[in-house]
Amino acid sequence: MAARVALFPFPYQGHANPMFRLAAVLHARGFPVTVHPPEYRFVAVPDAIPAELVASEDVAALNASCAAPFGDRLAALLAKEGGVRCVIADVLWYEPAAAARELGVPLLALMTSSASSFRMYMEYPVLIDRGFLPVNDNL
């Protein structure tokens, strides 16, 4: 069995839809693809997300609750399903990135926001250097 591409979309519609489109393109080009969205039944990844976080915008808490399940699922793919060619994770999912690095699997990040948002993120170092970030609570 050929090594797979493991995709980890963040569980928000604006993040999942582009990841599924990427999965379709990769599959059409002959790559075996496994998609690992939490709480869906494509490939079950027990996410341990407490009920109060299901519709949360607390990205850190979502990542923390999924750290072990992501690592376990990726390790299982490496051991049982012909390996993993690479992991493609949404930029908001940093726990799959940590698991991929720990297991030695190449990692790519998919950013689903607009080009203007990307440009804004690229300017963070400048804002920090100029003292605008972090925001001072005394303002």
Image (cartoon, rainbow, N blue to C red):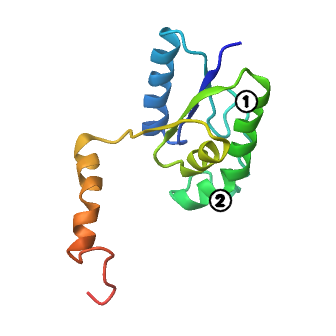
Question: Where in the figure is residue 70, as x and y percent of width and height?
Answer: 68, 43
The quadrant holding residue 18 is: top left
Q: Position of residue 110 (x, y in %)?
A: 43, 37
Q: In this figure, what is the number of numbered marks?
A: 2
Within 10 Å of the Cα at label 2, are there few (<14), some (14-19), or many (20+) other Cα atoms? few
Residue at the image point whose x is 53% and y is 57% from the top: 59
> Distance from label 1 to label 2 (Cα)?
30 Å
Res. 132 image quadrant: bottom left
N-term-proximal mark, 1 vs 2:
2
- Of the two numbered discs 1 and 2 in the rendering, the one whose residue sits closer to the viewer: 1
Q: Which residue is mark 2?
A: 52
Q: Where residue 118 is drawn, which disc sits there?
A: none
Q: Is 122 on the left-hand or right-hand side of 24?
A: left
Q: Above or below — where is 76 with respect to 61?
A: above
Locate residue 113: give its quadrant: top left
Give how far across and how far down residue 7 sits, in percent. Answer: 56, 31
| Amino acid marked by disc 1 | Leu
Question: Residue 77: which disc?
Answer: 1
Q: Position of residue 40 (x, y in %)?
A: 66, 34
Does 138 sit left or right of 63 as displayed? left
